[in-house]
Image (spheres, helix red, strand yellow):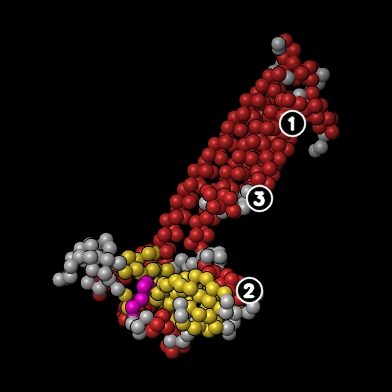
């Protein structure tokens, strides 16, 4: 029940001891502030890892050929391994139920022009599945399809920034661009969460790229999406089977560290998330250590406060105040100070995180959008308030048991 006399007494005590009140509150506010900012930085670090991998699909294997380092099956070392269209057909035939989609990728770059405008862009020969792999979001038009691949059409899907650079506000759809001396029709414009660099790419049918390069069937790499239903452990097993199959097909020594390389995006993502989570735990541990230091500080200050007010407590008891009222008064004072300054520290921490969520931390320290869940911030603040109350309760309870005559003799 609300007792106005107790609260008047609390505010009078605060008014008379402004410095003591400020020091107690500052300890609380600083602890919460440091916790909120550090925890938010940990979340920002985790966001960076998610952003780095999140702009592409995560159920992906990327198969790269390279040069062998060991001789095998009559072949000498330093043999350059090449992938071709037949490898894709064989992989699908061998592992069909485990595969969601497959797309080759032939990476090139060169001058791209439209009328008087020109610039250098990356252009990629791909299949229809690359849209899912890259998570390309079509703004208008369509993506490369199976018919484009089969008929080797001179069709191009360009990024948002390519349209902006070359077309200067004009709609690119249906227009013709020159890619390294060959004319392509723009059939789609895409955007990508990966940012401007990703949106400065151009995609064409991989068969068209092969046709332009002498009607060969060579491909630079294979992007393969596994069926997500197999899970992480299934993906790891599939990766080993796939590597063994391709090495055997291409006559690469099983112990050769090169020749064929498979990048498992899912595994890389999990490893990096684990690393980020470890760093987040460490940061959270430091933040909690700060909170504990704050609790210890509150406890020490409250012991001093109660000791300082021993004579006052004796006078109040002599005038009829019960131990329960004395304990309640000191407890409420502690909770009030801790709550006010705790929420001030929490709000200041959240404000700081909002101020620094720009590009500076992301570019220099790999921290993206540092933030803390409001529920977490409030929970920790309330936890500190409860701990502050506990820190005050023990010395208050002890003081309330002192006999008035003893308290009045206290110096």
N-term mark: 2 or 3 = 2
Q: Residue at x 60, y 39 (%)?
A: 34
Q: Residue furthest bottom?
A: 151
Identify whether 173 is placed above or below 24. below
Query: Which sits in the foreground, 104 or 39?
Result: 104
Residue 254 is situated, as x and y percent measured from the top left of the image, at 23, 65
Q: Residues within 10 Å of mark 2 (few under 14, many from 20)?
A: few
Gap in angstroms between the C-alphas marked 1 and 2: 66 Å
State yes or no: residue 110 in magenta.
no
Q: Residue furthest left?
A: 74
**Callout 2: helix, strand or loop?**
loop
N-term mark: 1 or 3 = 1
Residue 219 is situated, as x and y percent measured from the top left of the image, at 36, 76
Q: Is residue 397 visible?
A: no
Q: Residue at x 65, y 32 (%)?
A: 27
Q: Which residue is mark 3?
A: 354
Residue 373 is situated, as x and y percent measured from the top left of the image, at 62, 51
Quadrant location of residue 330? top right
Q: Which residue is mark 1?
A: 333
Q: Which label sits on residue 217?
A: none
In the picture, which quadrant includes the C terminus?
top right
The segment highlighted magenta reads: 217-222
Q: Main secondary structure of the magenta part?
A: strand
- State left or right for residue 346 relative to residue 54: right
């Amino acid at each position: 029940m609300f007792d106005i006399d107790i609260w008047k007494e609390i505010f009078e005590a605060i008014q008379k001891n402004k410095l003591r009140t400020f020091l107690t509150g500052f300890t609380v506010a600083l602890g919460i502030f440091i916790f909120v900012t550090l925890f938010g930085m940990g979340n920002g670090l985790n966001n960076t890892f998610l952003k780095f991998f999140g702009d592409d699909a995560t159920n992906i294997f990327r198969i790269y050929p390279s040069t062998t380092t060991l001789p095998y099956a009559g072949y000498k070392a330093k043999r350059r391994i090449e992938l071709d269209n037949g490898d894709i057909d064989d992989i699908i035939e061998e592992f069909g139920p485990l595969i969601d989609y497959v797309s080759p990728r032939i990476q090139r770059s060169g001058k791209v022009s439209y009328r008087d405008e020109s610039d250098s862009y990356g252009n990629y020969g791909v299949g229809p599945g690359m849209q899912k792999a890259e998570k390309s979001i079509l703004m208008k038009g369509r993506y490369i399809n199976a018919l484009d691949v089969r008929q080797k059409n001179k069709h191009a899907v360009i990024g948002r920034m390519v349209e902006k650079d070359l077309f200067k506000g004009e709609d690119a759809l249906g227009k013709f661009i020159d890619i390294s001396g060959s004319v392509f029709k723009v059939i789609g414009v895409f955007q990508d969460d990966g940012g401007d660099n990703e949106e400065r790419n151009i995609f064409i049918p991989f068969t068209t790229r092969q046709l332009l390069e002498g009607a060969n069937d060579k491909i630079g790499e294979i992007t393969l999406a596994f069926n997500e239903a197999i899970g992480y452990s299934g993906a790891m097993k599939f990766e080993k089977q796939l590597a063994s199959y391709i090495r055997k097909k291409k006559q690469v020594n099983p112990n050769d560290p090169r020749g064929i390389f498979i990048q498992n995006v899912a595994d890389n993502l999990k490893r990096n998330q684990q690393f980020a989570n470890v760093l987040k735990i460490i940061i959270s541990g430091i933040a909690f250590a700060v909170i504990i230091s704050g609790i210890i500080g509150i406890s020490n200050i409250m012991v001093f406060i109660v000791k300082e007010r021993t004579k006052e407590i004796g006078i109040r008891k002599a005038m009829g105040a019960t131990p329960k009222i004395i304990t309640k008064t000191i407890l409420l004072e502690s909770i009030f100070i801790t709550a006010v300054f705790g929420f001030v520290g929490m709000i200041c921490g959240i404000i700081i995180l909002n101020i620094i969520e720009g590009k500076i931390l992301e570019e220099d320290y790999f921290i993206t959008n540092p933030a803390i869940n409001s529920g977490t911030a409030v929970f920790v603040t309330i936890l500190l308030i409860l701990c502050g109350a506990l820190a005050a309760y023990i010395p208050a309870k002890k003081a309330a048991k002192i006999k008035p005559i003893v308290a009045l003799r206290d110096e």
